[in-house]
Amino acid sequence: MATRNIIKIGNPLLREHSREVTVFDEKLGILIDDMTETMFQANGVGLAAPQVGILRRVCVVSTDGDKVYELVNPRIIKSSGEQKGVEGCLSVPGKRGTVVRPKKITVEAFDRHGVRKKYNVEGFTAVAFCHEMDHLDGILYIDKATNEEDDEE
Ligand code: NI
């Protein structure tokens, strides 16, 4: 595994629409492993492939620092409720903002081997899923935040 460089706001790649994964090969596995290591090293709870400059629909999420969700071509098939929470982004350093997200979601995604999976997540994990999936469509949380403030480290 290796860490990759996280691109920052202002880089046009963050605003691109990522393409679906069609080939589930070793290269995809390496990308997912590298993204996971990069996320943990940066103390993040999620990372999307475009944040490391790869315009493919892949993200990783780990909100407890242990279980890692690997999401390939993810899509929300059900959502309910509403929650308001503070978000930050590894590509928008030093900032945070309040965003409204669904409370519970059901997501269908493939794993690295091309096996279809379904996840029911809620609370902060649902927030992280939504945040990372937005990256795949070139959307940043700051587009949705009702306020933006400097992060107090
Ligand atoms: Ni982000």
Image (tube, rainbow, N blue to C red):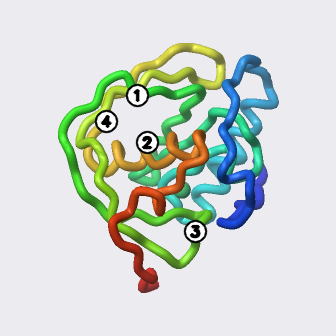
How far apart, in angstroms, are the residues tagged by discs 4 and 3? Answer: 25 Å
Neighbour tally class for label 2: few under 14, some 14-19, many 20 plus, Cα within 10 Å: many
How far apart, in angstroms, are the residues tagged by discs 1 and 4? Answer: 11 Å
Residue 76 tag number:
1
Circle 2: residue type:
Phe
Query: Farthest residue in the top direction?
Result: 115
Mark nearer the N terminus (1 vs 2): 1
Residue 142 pos. (x, y %)? 47, 63
Mark nearer the N terminus (3 vs 1): 1
- Check mark 3 vs ligand 1: CB closer than 8 Å? yes or no: yes
Residue occupied by mark 4: 121
Dividing the picture into quadrants, the one containing residue 99 is: bottom left
Count of all numbered marks drawn on residues in the image: 4
Q: Secondary structure at mark 3?
A: strand
Which is more foreground, mark 2 or mark 3? 3
Q: Are marks 2 and 4 in contact (CB under 8 Å)?
A: yes
Residue at image x 45%, y 83%?
150
Q: Secondary structure at mark 2?
A: helix
Circle 4: residue type:
Val
Q: Secondary structure at mark 1?
A: strand
- Check mark 2 vs ligand 1: CB closer than 8 Å? yes or no: no
Q: Are marks 2 and 3 in contact (CB under 8 Å)?
A: no
Mark nearer the N terminus (2 vs 3): 3
Residue at image x 52%, y 60%?
44
Residue occupied by mark 3: 92
Q: Is residue 133 left or right of residue 51?
A: left
Mark nearer the N terminus (1 vs 4): 1
Residue occupied by mark 2: 129
How far apart, in angstroms, are the residues tagged by discs 3 and 1? Answer: 24 Å
Dividing the picture into quadrants, the one containing residue 110 is: top right
